[in-house]
Amino acid sequence: MFRVVIHPEAVRELNAIRVFHRRTILSVVRKVLAVEPTLERRSRVKRMRGEFYPPYRLRVGDFRVYYDVDERRREVLVLHVWDKGRRLTPHTVRPIRRRKP
């Protein structure tokens, strides 16, 4: 099992989402990311390309959860929760520092 940590930036983004959708997103995050966060599934989990992207994306309805996985610490860090219309570009993603081990 992986420990799921939600970055303060992602918490702010979650708080801006309606409660019904927020509960659904958090439920799927707990079920999928805590068990096998790096297993790519047909349309749900995708490994992202490009150096400025968070490594993984989880699709939950009309929302996308962008996250990083630390295999050594068995930890998943949720970085962003956006609606599907928002695009990842170097201008929309602010650098988020990982904690030192």
Image (cartoon, rainbow, N blue to C red):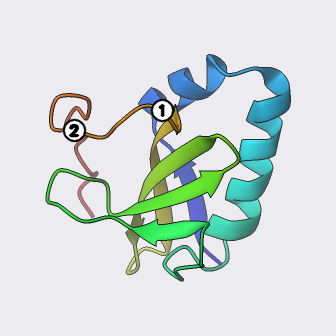
Image quarter in which the C terminus is found: bottom left
Of residues 44 and 16, which is closer to you in this image? 44
Residue 89 tag number = 2
Q: Which residue is mark 1?
A: 85
Residue 96 position, x and y percent, is 25, 40
Q: Residue at x 62, y 16 (%)?
A: 16
Residue 10 position, x and y percent, is 49, 33
Residue 97 position, x and y percent, is 22, 44
Q: Specify whether 79 is left or right of 63.
A: left
Amino acid under label 2? Thr
Q: Residue at x 24, y 65 (%)?
A: 49
> In the picture, residue 21 is in which quadrant?
top right
Q: Is residue 50 above or below residue 5?
A: below
Amino acid under label 1? Gly
Residue 61 position, x and y percent, is 71, 47
Residue 11 tag number = none
What secondary structure is found at the residue carrying circle 2? Answer: loop
Indicate which label's residue lies in the foreground, 2 or 1. 1
In this view, the residue farthest toward the right is 20
Image quarter in which the N terminus is found: bottom right
Query: Dot 2, how many residues are within 10 Å of its Cα: few (below 14), some (14-19), or many (20+)?
Result: few
Of residues 56 and 96, which is closer to you in this image? 56
Q: Specify whether 47 is left or right of 90.
A: right
What secondary structure is found at the residue carrying circle 1? Answer: loop
Task: Tell how many labels.
Answer: 2
Q: Residue at x 53, y 48 (%)?
A: 65
